[in-house]
Amino acid sequence: MRIGIIGVGEVGRCFAPALSQLGSAPILLCDPRPTRAAEDLARDLGAGLVGCASEALGACDLVLSCVNGAAAGEIAATVADCDAPGQVLFDFATASPQVKRDAADALRRCGRHYVDVAIMGAVSIGGVETPLLAAGDENAEAVQSARDLMLRAGFRLAWLAEAKPGDAASLKLLRSVFTKGLEALAVECLVAAEHFGVRHALYEVLSDVDGTPLPAFLEMLVSTHLLHAERRLAEVEQAESQLRDADLPVRLLPCIRGLFGATATAMAQERLTETPSPGEALKRLETIGKSVGRVAKDQSTARTENREPGPRC
């Protein structure tokens, strides 16, 4: 199987050696602005290195797109223009679900196979064994052959059941909501903990979190949020005051206060006495969130309409 890799950045440089070791065929690398690291890799692997994908990828059976998300659609269009019926494109770019769906449609129309792949971890840490989540035409013979080859190369490739292109990208972005939000909270919280000299003590008082499986912990949070938002709002306000009194950076807590405040206001008339199920709580929270969003949008529109026109240029 002839393999082409578009984009020889961190991801491409990680995947190329593993595939090259299989020895099935020389690897073709493609990067319009190759770095010294890309050139060295091509030399070490005995791989071709080209700058224009359309000039060479028509000869490849399997193409791995390892570009950034902004270029994902362009790469898919380039691959679609190549004269290579039955070709398989594994798209590792972090792009929107709609970009991935559009790319899949474009390749399907010209007899190609498209697989949406989300990298669910840090390649810099996990290397070729970083977990990968795929969605696409798993049952196509060409895709199965490509999948089997990647598994032999050591890829940790799992298929998302009954999924279509775009679904893996959607899950990755939802994962980012959690992980990037947690990262931001860690920054705000640990800066304060270090300032007060209690960082290691904080780890101790957070140790109970380690004793609960993450899904159960998250569902406990959203299930009890409706019932206890008002009390927890007071704690958020006290925490924010503590940081402000110490002249520490406070960027997330005002947003958190706003979320708890919106829930507390919405639930003030309902007088819940029992904790709802996670599903029930999430439906109610979606309704509250949409209501708050509509109010904010209306207020923004009103401010714009009432604004005096500025000077004409």
Image (cartoon, rainbow, N blue to C red):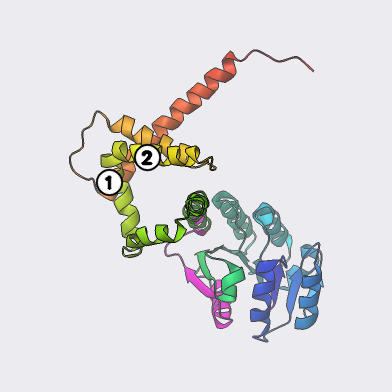
Please state the horizontal and vertical placement of residue 83, each as a whole percent of the image: 73, 66
From the image, which quarter does the C terminus lie in? top right
Residue located 32% across and 53% down the image:
219
Residue located 48% across and 55% down the image:
197
Regarding mark 1 in the picture, which secondary structure is present there? helix
Q: What stretch is highlighted in magenta?
A: 139-168
Is residue 101 shown in magenta?
Answer: no
Of 282 and 99, which appears nearest the observer?
282
Residue located 52% across and 74% down the image:
156
Whichever of callouts 2 and 1 sits on the residue coming sooner in the sequence is 1
Of 71 and 125, which appears nearest the observer?
125
- Which residue is disc 1 drawn over? 224
> How many other residues sit within 10 Å of disc 1, few (<14), some (14-19) or many (≥20)?
some
Disc 2 marks a residue whose amino acid type is Glu
Please state the horizontal and vertical placement of residue 85, each as a whole percent of the image: 66, 68
Horizontally, residue 245 falls left or right of residue 106, namely: left
Horizontally, residue 279 falls left or right of residue 124, namely: left
> How many other residues sit within 10 Å of disc 2, few (<14), some (14-19) or many (≥20)?
few
Residue located 51% across and 72% down the image:
157
Of 275 and 98, which appears nearest the observer?
275
Please state the horizontal and vertical placement of residue 64, each as a whole percent of the image: 65, 68
Position of residue 148 relative to residue 133, above or below, is: below
Is residue 153 shown in magenta?
Answer: yes
Specify the quadrant of the image occupied by residue 32: bottom right
Of 289 and 133, which appears nearest the observer?
289
Horizontally, residue 260 falls left or right of residue 190, namely: left
Disc 1 marks a residue whose amino acid type is Thr
Specify the quadrant of the image occupied by residue 77: bottom right
- Which residue is disc 2 drawn over? 286
Regarding mark 2 in the picture, which secondary structure is present there? helix
